[in-house]
Amino acid sequence: MKYRNLHSKFAKALFLSAQKEKIEDKVLEEFTALEQLFQNETFREKISALSSLPSSELKTLLQRTFENILSPLLINLLIILGSRHLFSLIRGVYMSYQKLIFEKNQIDILDVVSARDLSDAEKKNILELLQKHNQKKIHIEFSFDTKLLSGLQIYKNTRLTDLSSRARLEKIRKNLFSLPL
């Protein structure tokens, strides 16, 4: 069975349910904390092992574990994912849900890739600079890729602004090879 875009379907269902209850932002806050737990390999392994339990036991265990911590909507999502052995989709569901919230709140999502891991001060400076040049509020996801050598790549939807040394060197290389000798 293919699971292409299944995370988006779960996120959309969660978003619509949260919207009905007017708790979209609360669910995002809780989901952010939950997703951070899933970043921990030990937690991820332990919770994934729960998928082997019978559905009724899984449901009871998840409800007791997350009662008064997560909204019933997120607990139900965990029950559904666990009963279908799909805990591996949690990151994708989270990212898709976050995107839906940002679209609702008219916030642009930018992905900034740097050549190295940036300090908090550098991230703050980049956020302030990009916010000045953007008409909407922005949310930035930072990552790094040492192949860039130096500089940044900024992705907004499918548009790339490449300010990396690698891109500059590639442009110089192309110009050199296009010169008649």
Image (tube, grey):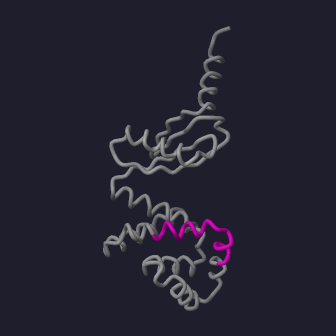
Placement of 46 over or under 148, stated as above or below: below
* The C terminus - image quarter: top right
Name the residue rendered at 61%, 89% in the picture: 54
Magenta residues, dominant SS class: helix
User: Where is residue 90, by image quadrant?
Assistant: bottom right
Name the residue rendered at 64%, 9% in the picture: 180
Name the residue rendered at 65%, 84% in the picture: 52
The span shown in magenta is: 30-46
Residue 65 relative to residue 115: left or right? left
Where in the figure is residue 132, as x and y percent of width and height? 37, 39
Q: Residue furthest top?
A: 181
User: Where is residue 165, by image quadrant?
Assistant: top right
Placement of 84 over or under 40, stated as above or below: below
Residue 45 relative to residue 128: left or right? right
Placement of 110 over or under 5, stated as above or below: above
Where in the figure is residue 40, as x and y percent of width and height? 64, 68
* The N terminus - image quarter: bottom right
Where in the figure is residue 24, as x and y percent of width and height? 37, 68
Where in the figure is residue 133, as x and y percent of width and height? 38, 37
In the image, residue 146 lies in the stretch drawn in magenta: no
Placement of 51 over or under 146, stated as above or below: below
